[in-house]
Image: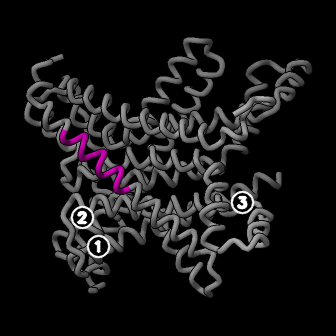
């Protein structure tokens, strides 16, 4: 192992890691937002809308992420969407994630007992408050594992952005490998950083899960 | 939109489609065989088998597929092992899917009630025929939906092997896009083909499942 290499390439690798985290965080946030809105819109009683949204979800889930990225990045300019590689990567990640998040949220909505909503309605809570204070907190408990799982899948998908020349970790590591022929160091760096990212995300997920379900798992007789 | 570009290049796109399907099938085949071994190793290989299997699965599920592919294709030559693109592609897809497949098998095996194996043992079945006649047929039936799902995921993942230059659907659509300067149409055509294959696979899965449920 050539430790000198890490000193020389450390800054660019760290910058790449920062870019990976940025793309992942922004893409995930965008995906969740679009996914939530999609799931919400599918519940509206507008004829045909649910069908159109379902088609969107099926198309996004049925095609490879790489093809979606190419379509957005090199096909986009032909219909007036001109994005640089990083923005295209983030938007692509958001679109890709949105279809999966939409399905997760849909399952969450379906899992909220009808009685909760009816009770809130009979207490004259406005619809916005029902959504915010009754439906979302309840569904979050049941869908959190699936959400975290999808977030972890998206950390791994960020690697594909390197093909669009987004200067994230994979791209920087490949540059290092190409310039120095240092195979093992490159593998070591990538394995370490991606493992770190996945570990942190799953730990945060577990912590969030504990926090959300603490009222369900409290021992009998415990005083909070 | 100029769909002429697509119709003119359709033969190439279909050639790429055949390559995509072939590589995915080869990958899932490797994955099935390796996955079965890993699963059996984890269940009946003692503590060593369990640990090795767990490390293997967590590595191949935790490391992004593109990295695995480039590891095989670019890094192995640096230590003196030359790998042709197609071998690297099938190898990477097979290794990655073996980790997922072994978990699918393990889940279905664990879902079979203990009593089935014990009853067979009490009736004097040998260990080999317990696996062959009692456990594996049931495990297979339970794992069909997950395996079809895995095949669809693998088919989509196979687009990544375009990076090492295998002329599969994504790669072909890339060259159609750059030679005709019509990326929108080329990639939409590629997406449509992927969608059709995945739809057909999902349908096939439903049919097989129904067939297995009837018997």
Do badges 1 and 2 share one subunit?
yes
In the image, A142 versus A92, the foreground residue is A142
Q: Residues within 10 Å of mark 3 (few under 14, many from 20)?
A: some
- Residue bearing the label numbered 2: B174
> Is residue A16 located in the magenta-colored stretch of the structure?
yes
Please report, as a chain letter, where disc 2 is located: B
Q: Is residue A62 visible?
A: no
Q: Residue at x 20, y 36 (%)?
A: A14
What mark, if any, has residue B50 been given in the picture?
A: none
Q: Earlier in the sequence, mark 1 or mark 2?
A: 2
Task: Answer above or below: position of B50 versus A74.
Answer: above
- Residue bearing the label numbered 3: A112
In the image, B91 versus A120, the foreground residue is A120
Q: Residues within 10 Å of mark 1 (few under 14, many from 20)?
A: many
Q: Could you tell me residue A214's position as x and y percent?
A: 66, 38
- Residue bearing the label numbered 1: B186
Q: Do the residues under discs 1 and 2 have CB atoms within 8 angstroms? A: yes
Q: Main secondary structure of the magenta part?
A: helix
Q: Residue furthest right?
A: B123
In the image, A157 versus A47, the foreground residue is A47
Magenta stretch: give its range.
Answer: A15-27
């Amino acid at each position: 192992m050539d430790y000198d290499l890490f000193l020389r390439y450390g800054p660019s690798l760290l910058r790449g890691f920062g870019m990976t985290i940025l793309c992942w965080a922004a893409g995930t946030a965008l995906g969740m937002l679009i996914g939530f809105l999609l799931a919400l819109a599918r519940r509206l009683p507008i004829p045909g809308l649910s069908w159109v949204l379902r088609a969107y979800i099926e198309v996004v889930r049925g095609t490879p992420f790489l093809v979606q990225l190419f379509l957005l990045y090199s096909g986009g300019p032909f219909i007036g969407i001109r994005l640089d590689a990083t923005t295209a990567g983030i938007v692509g990640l958001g679109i890709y994630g949105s279809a999966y998040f939409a399905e997760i949220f849909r399952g969450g909505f379906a899992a909220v007992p009808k009685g909760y909503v009816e009770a809130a309605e009979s207490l004259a809570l406005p619809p916005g408050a029902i959504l915010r204070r009754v439906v979302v907190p309840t569904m979050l408990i049941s869908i959190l594992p699936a959400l975290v799982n999808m977030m972890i899948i998206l950390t791994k998908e960020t690697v594909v952005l390197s093909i669009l020349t987004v200067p994230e970790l994979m791209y920087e590591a490949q540059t290092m490998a190409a310039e120095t022929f240092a195979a093992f160091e490159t593998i070591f760096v990538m394995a370490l950083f991606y493992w770190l990212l996945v570990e942190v995300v799953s730990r945060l997920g577990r912590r969030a899960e504990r926090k959300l379900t603490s009222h369900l798992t409290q021992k009998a007789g415990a005083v909070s | 939109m100029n769909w002429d570009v697509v119709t003119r290049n359709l033969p190439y796109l279909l050639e790429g489609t055949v390559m995509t399907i072939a590589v995915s099938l080869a990958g899932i085949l490797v994955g099935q065989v390796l996955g079965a071994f890993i699963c059996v190793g984890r269940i009946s290989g003692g503590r060593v088998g369990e640990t090795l299997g767990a490390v293997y699965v967590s590595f191949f599920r935790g490391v992004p597929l593109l990295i695995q592919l480039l590891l095989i294709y670019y890094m192995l030559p640096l230590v003196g092992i030359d790998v042709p693109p197609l071998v690297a592609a099938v190898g990477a897809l097979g290794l990655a899917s073996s980790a997922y497949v072994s978990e699918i098998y393990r889940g279905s095996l664990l879902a079979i009630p203990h009593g089935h194996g014990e009853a067979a043992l009490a009736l004097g079945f040998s260990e080999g025929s317990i696996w062959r006649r009692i456990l594996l047929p049931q495990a297979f039936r339970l794992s069909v939906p997950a395996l079809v799902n895995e095949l669809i995921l693998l088919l989509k993942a196979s687009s990544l092997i375009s990076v090492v230059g295998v002329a599969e659907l994504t790669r072909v659509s890339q060259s159609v896009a750059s030679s005709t300067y019509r990326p929108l149409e080329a990639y939409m055509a590629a997406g449509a083909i992927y969608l059709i294959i995945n739809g057909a696979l999902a349908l096939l899965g439903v049919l097989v499942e129904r067939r297995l449920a009837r018997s």
